[in-house]
Image (cartoon, grey):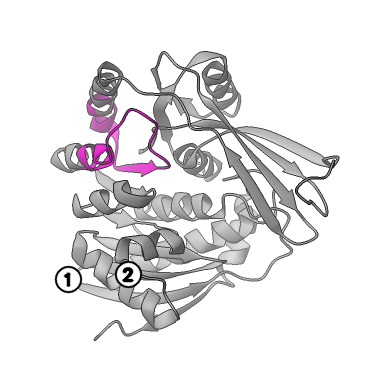
Amino acid sequence: MILTVTLNPALDRTMTVPHFQAGYRHRATDTVILPGGKGINVARAVKILGRPVIATGFVGGRKGDQIVSDLNGEGILCDFVPVGEESRISTAVVDPATNTITEITEQGPEIRPDEMNLMFEKLDYLGKAADIAVLAGSVPPGLDDDCYAHIIQRFRRMGVKVYFYTYGDPLRQGIKAGADVVFPKLVEAEKVIGYEFTGMDDRIEAAKRMREMGGGSVVITFRYGCVAHLADGDRTRTFVGKMPEVEVVSPMGWGDALVGGYAVRVLEGDAPVECLRFGLGCAAANLLRYGAGIFLPSDAERLTDAVELEEVSAED
């Protein structure tokens, strides 16, 4: 079973606004509202692929009630910790004319120490049935930067594999805590390493260095592709991956679909490189649909065959 942990869930509102310009009045041509946060998006992808999944995290207020209700409507099992403050709304404006996204995100509820203790108890309980735990998304106010690191350590003691991605110092500390697979975006990898990358060699070196920091495997994602430094038995292999070209409907959430597809294939016993290939196929399929983590399994299978993976050297 796959367990997803989203400490800062949201109601994600995606609006399609052709030729969007700041400071002008626009009319959206389409609006989609879904429960979101990166871990929830991964849970959606896993559910679509027909594997058992449970989503957990913090929810509060009327927005939190809607997150739970809508997840139940999608058939996604969830077991959240209620908190005193209101869950957040995130808004994304997609301009199909330029294929750009403008995002506006609320901060989220402030989490009290007693609420975090309830989360630890919840994770200890849910972790007993989990093979993989996906920890993803931002850290809400009230929690320290090492909160993900503490959760990773708890899961590792339980023998649960941990897949992880977030931002800034929580990402750095989570890597050092020994997450099994880390999926940072390019800009976040640059922050962890400490400089802006100038080419593919820098990205390859960064994946290697992040693995040396403690990550079991590292998949750095960037525009419709990735660099992956994968643990494969007693050796490591490095790949540059490219998703097949598709007519993009919405670029929202393809990285979450990648993680969901990767995790599903790990449970099915595939080799790491094939897990990566299928994850990229799911990511490409997500580009064809509105909504993070939403795609057709048939599209994912078809596009997986067109994924380009090149094995490269990561030697100094």
- Residue 81 vertical placement versus 103 (above, below): above
Give residue 203's position: percent from left, percent from top.
39, 74
For badge 2, the amino acid type reads Ala
Quadrant assignment for the N terminus: top left
SS label for mark 1 = loop
Q: Residue at x 32, y 85 (%)?
A: 313
Residue at which label 1 appears:
234
Can the viewer see residue 271 in this picture?
Answer: no
Badge 1: residue crowd in 10 Å (few <14, some 14–19, many ≥20): few
Front residue of 73/265: it is 73
Closest to the observer: 155 or 200?
Answer: 200
Whether residue 139 is in magenta: the answer is yes
Can you identify the residue that label 2 sits on? Answer: 207
Q: Residue shown at 47%/29% (left/top)?
A: 108
Residue 47, above or below 306: above
Q: In the image, which residues are magenta?
A: 124-152
